[in-house]
Amino acid sequence: MLQSKICLLTLTFPRARIIWSSSPYATTEIFKDLKTNNAEPDPAKAIIVGADDDTEAGAGINAAAEELLWCLPGINAKNIKHVMNRISTVRELCEMDIFQVQDLLGVEPGKLCWEFMHRGETNR
């Protein structure tokens, strides 16, 4: 149960970093090792980290549609912006035939995505 939730978390938020340890003590040791030879973090800098990297953050993006796209097989950090620039609605993606989806995502990712969206349909 926990493993499936962690998998879903990493698929939904691919930029998130997870450190797994066997105990709270082991966790403190890992953080201590990671901290070795590094200066104390500056809280002011930590607040703005990443803010300058993405100039399009939130600009005209439908967050619910983007979140839905992240959940589809074949959609990943490398192609999501391309997909969002090429389609105007999720419905448009769903109505594409397999060849159009493969053209958009690539052969194998497109096949995975199309088959997931059309799973259970009887008239393919």
Image (tube, rainbow, N blue to C red):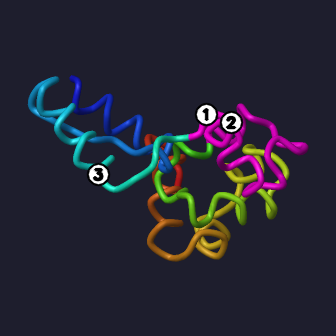
* Residue projecting furthest to the right: 60
Q: Residues within 10 Å of mark 1 (few under 14, many from 20)?
A: few
Residue at 85 percent of width and 51 percent of height: 88
Where residue 53 sits in the image (x, y, percent)? 73, 57
Could you tell me the amino acid type at mark 1? Pro
Position of 23 relative to 54 (above/below): above
Residue at 63 percent of width and 66 percent of height: 101
The residues bearing labels 1 and 3 have C-alpha atoms spaced at a distance of 18 Å
Nearer to me, 19 or 43 = 43
* Horizontal relation, residue 74 to residue 59: left or right: left
Where residue 90 sits in the image (x, y, percent)? 73, 44
Q: Secondary structure at mark 1?
A: helix
Nearer to me, 124 or 7 = 7
Could you tell me the amino acid type at mark 2? Ala
Of the numbered discs 1 and 3, the one sitting upstream in the chain is 3
Q: Which residue is mark 1?
A: 43
Position of 107 relative to 14 (above/below): below
**Are discs 2 and 1 less than 8 Å apart at CB?**
yes
Q: Secondary structure at mark 3?
A: loop
Q: Which residue is mark 2?
A: 44
Where residue 111 sits in the image (x, y, percent)? 48, 65
Q: Would you identify the image quadrant in which residue 66 lies?
A: top right
Q: Which residue is mark 3?
A: 36
Q: Which residues are magenta?
A: 42-68
Residue at 71 percent of width and 60 percent of height: 81
| Quarter that holds the N terminus | top left
Residue at 53 percent of width and 58 percent of height: 76
